[in-house]
Amino acid sequence: MTFWDHLDELRKVLFRIIGVWFVLAIGFFIAMPYLFDSVILAPCHNDFIFYDLLRLIGQKLNLNDDFFTQQFQVNLVNINLAAPFFIHMSTAFWLSVVTAMPYLLYEVWRFISPALYPNEKKGVRKALAIGTVMFFIGVLLGYFMVYPLTLRFLSTYQLSSQIENIISLNSYIDNFMMLVLCMGLAFELPLVTWLLSLMGIVNKSFLRKYRRHAIVAIVIVAAVITPTGDPFTLAVVAIPLYLLYEMSILMIKDKQKEIDTP
């Protein structure tokens, strides 16, 4: 195929992806009233599944700390006349982006597979499948654990007893989308590392050499993502990220060893 043939094929891929996003966005827009109450606002209520799990752990282990026994409820307010409508649209769009991720990776596979050798196809297919699964694991971890812990800490944090925390709808949605998507993208670390190894930028020896530096960076990133201050929340984010780093080491080959092998 010529350069223009490839460009035309890429244009078709982009149109298909945009079409799927558009259809999903319309579906989420229609279902948004239910999704908003049952899914997006669920971490605001005391009966959220993760809060029940913490209370159950506290009961089983006789832990009386507020972290395990706290009763929690957040009431949101809206101070912008047009905010509900625009949040309705933007939330539907971002949910369509998240749910369309498997189709996006499938289109990427269809576009690049004709240029790959059979052994390369096997590796790329495996990487894309792992990338899809890891993305959704990150999203679920962000939704069920990271964001609820962050919300509970920040919404109850008091700078002064004279200041009452009133959480706006815009603030809630912005933090919700940021944390959930950041966790999904963070779980793409093995896939990104594998791609970098194919380009010769990193290898197994490099990742092993700078493992201690990576641990420090992971802890810093985890602290930024979850500014709750307690070690449990920090560990919830940092440990999976570190395991992803180790998975990255296992997934790639050491180019130097391949060169040295006769």
Image (cartoon, rainbow, N blue to C red):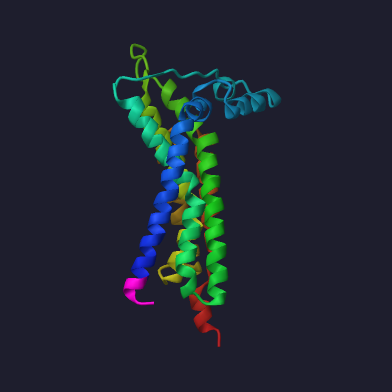
> Does 2 appear in magenta?
yes
Q: In this orientation, does residue 2 appear?
A: yes
Task: Give the residue at x 39% y 66%.
Answer: 9
Residue 148, compared with residue 107, is above or below; it is above
Horizontal arrangement in the rendering, residue 21 relative to residue 261 (left or right): left
The percent coordinates of residue 204 (x first, y second) are 50, 67
Q: In this orientation, does residue 211 appear?
A: no
> Does 57 appear in magenta?
no
**Residue farthest right in this picture:** 60
The percent coordinates of residue 209 (x first, y second) are 47, 64
Q: Main secondary structure of the magenta part?
A: helix
Is residue 224 or residue 1 the one in the foreground? 1
Number of callouts: 0
Horizontal arrangement in the rendering, residue 55 relative to residue 127 (left or right): right
Residue 157, compared with residue 122, is above or below; it is above
The percent coordinates of residue 205 (x first, y second) are 49, 69
Task: Give the residue at x 48% y 46%.
Answer: 184
Is residue 203 or residue 111 the one in the foreground? 111
Give the quarter of the figure containing the C terminus.
bottom right
What's drawn in magenta, residue-wise?
1-5
Is residue 219 or residue 200 the one in the foreground? 200
**Residue farthest top in this picture:** 162
Rendered image quadrant of residue 76: top left
The percent coordinates of residue 102 (x first, y second) are 51, 52
